[in-house]
Every structure is written in structure tokens, then in C-alpha cells.
Image (cartoon, grey):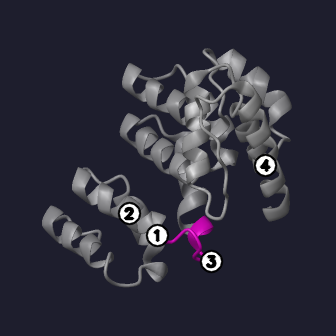
Amino acid sequence: MNDTSLEARFYAMLLLTQLSAEGLLEDVFPRLFDRDQQIRNIARSVAMAYQSAPNFRSALLDPLRNRLRVTNEELHIDVCTDLLTRLRDVPSIPLLMEQLGKHREHTNKNIHSSLQLLTFHNWSSPYEWKQWWATAKDQARYLWLVAAMDSQSDQLRALAFDELQRLPGLETNYQPEQPSKLRQREQKVVEEWFQKNL
């Protein structure tokens, strides 16, 4: 997995898609930032498959947050941003806000998109994000989701719809294009579901 040969690293990572990687998650972490994109993609798939592993936080989640906190390398920022967003990692929100506006357009766009996906908000400046976070940080994420279901923004309602599709066991008739009255009715259904299932 740490061989200087790209081919050796590729096949080592590919093998982990067929074998248990739980005891090797710390070795998977560096491959998330490999110079080869195929290896990075396989490492990401392996990492995402072990979210329930007892060592997931210490081997992958905390190191991802720490890397985002200290790195200036845009590839590393992009990788951390992508994975932490896929994991719906709310504690990474202030770390992402700190990175806003400090990088090239592509990376800044990725960070902004990730913040939208994590928060169901669409502030335009780092100041607005930080001002919002000062009051929102103590709220449960599902409340942001429920509020976005009846947002004036088509984009935020679409994000809310996509997120609702990810929730196993939730039955809702929500559609982003519904009249507000119907959306509000579904808001109550979703909020009650979260209150019962948290």
C-alpha cells in the first residue's frame, strides 16, 4: 500500500475492496491523497465502506479533519472536503468556513458547494457563513434540512429533496416543486420522523 510503485499501490488498494480493511484503515488514509487518481478513488470507496468500524474515527475521520485544518495543498483540501461532505460531518463545517476564499476558484467552489450540502444554506461570503454559524452551531442538522424543504430557493429545496432520498425508512411525499402549503405539511412529517428516530 505504501510502495513507491504506482502499480503495486493500485493492486494493493484494489485487493482491499475484496478483503477486510478494518485493521488497515490507518494505511488507507495516505492513499486518499495518492498522486494517482484511480488509487485515490479506490481508497475513498474503501474508506466509505467502513463508517461503522470502531476505529473509523481515529484512523480516518479525525485525521481528515486535522488535514483540512492544517494543509494548504489544494488537492488535499479537495479530498478532505469531498470525503467530509460525503460523511455529512457537521463538525467540519467551521473548518470548511475557514478555507473559504483562500484558494483557486475550483477549490473555493467545491468548499462552497460542500457547505451548502451540509447546511442547506447558501450564504455568499465567509462573514455571512460565520455569522450564521454563531447561532446555528447548537442546532441539530435535521432542523436545517426541514427548514430548507420550504425555502424560497429552488436549489436548497432540491438539496433537501436529495437528502431525504438518502434516509432509509422515511416515507414522505415531498417534492421541491409542490405549493408551499404541501411542502409545509411534509415538513411536519419529516420533523416527526426525525424526533422518533434520532
Q: Label 2, label 4: how many angstroms apart (C-alpha)? A: 33 Å
Image mark for residue 54: 3
Q: Where does the N terminus fall, quadrant-wise?
A: bottom left
Mark 1 lies on a secondary structure that is loop
* First in residue order: circle 4 vs circle 1: 1
Mark 4 lies on a secondary structure that is helix
Q: Label 1, label 3: how many angstroms apart (C-alpha)? A: 13 Å
* First in residue order: circle 3 vs circle 4: 3
From the image, give the main secondary structure of the stretch colored magenta. Answer: loop
Counting labels gives 4
Amino acid carrying mark 3 in the image: Pro
The residue pinned by badge 1 equals 49
Amino acid carrying mark 4 in the image: Val
Q: Label 4, label 1: how many angstroms apart (C-alpha)? A: 30 Å
Q: Position of residue 26 (x, y in %)?
A: 47, 70
Image mark for residue 45: 2
- Residue range highlighted in magenta: 50-58
Q: Where does the C terminus fall, quadrant-wise?
A: bottom right
* First in residue order: circle 1 vs circle 3: 1
Q: Position of residue 122 (x, y in %)?
A: 62, 23
